[in-house]
Image (spheres, grey):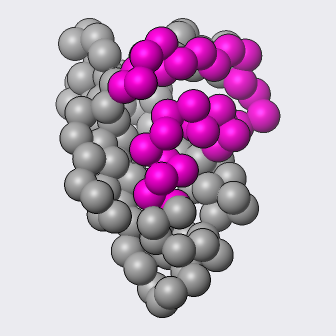
Amino acid sequence: MEIETQHKTVSKKIEDVYEFVTDLKNFEQLMPDSIDKFEVLDSDTFLFALSGMPQIVLKRKHQQPMDKLVLGAASDKLPFTLTVDLNAKNDDETGVILRFEGEFNSMMAMMIKTPITNFMNALSDNLSKI
C-alpha cells in the first residue's frame, strides 16, 4: 500500500526545513489535534498515539542531506516507512511530499487506508505552516 500527499510548499529555505524534520522532537508540532501522546525515546526514535489508535514507534532509517528523511516502524509487526521528500523551489521556498509505504494484507489495508491518509495529510498541512 502506498499513500502520497499532495505537493506542499514551505516558505523556508531547504536547509531550514531539513533541519526541522531531522530533529525528531519537532514531529510533535506536526501531529494532528487528535494526538494523545508524543515522546522522543532517543535521537533516532519517537513514539506517538492518536485517539483511538494504538501507540506507534517510528525510527530513523535513512536520511540524505537536503533531500530526504525516511522513518520506519520500529516493530516488524506492521512494517512500513514514512518518507519526507524535499526539493528546493527557490532560495526561500521548499517543496515537500510525504510518502507512506507498507505491506499489509487486503483486509488490513482497507481498514487503515483512510486513517493513515488523514494522518499524512495532517502532517503535510502542519509542515507547510512551520
Q: Residue at x 64, y 75 (%)?
A: 11
Quadrant assignment, res 50: top right
Provide the residue span drawn in magenta: 17-46
Q: Residue at x 49, y 34 (%)?
A: 24
Q: Residue at x 53, y 63 (%)?
A: 16
Up-down: is 15 above or below 24?
Answer: below
Look at the image and tell me whether residue 1 can be seen: no
State the quadrant of the C terminus: bottom right
Percent of width and height locating residue 21:
49, 48
Percent of width and height locating residue 103:
21, 31
Question: Depth check: 1 or 71 in front?
Answer: 71
Up-down: is 115 above or below 100?
Answer: above
Q: Is residue 110 magenta?
A: no
Percent of width and height locating residue 127:
62, 56
Question: Depth check: 127 or 79 in front?
Answer: 127
Question: Depth check: 79 or 25 in front?
Answer: 25
Direction from residue 22 to residue 80 in the image, left or right: left
Quadrant assignment, res 93: bottom right
Quadrant assignment, res 102: top left
Look at the image and tell me whether residue 67 can be seen: yes
Question: Depth check: 95 or 119 in front?
Answer: 95
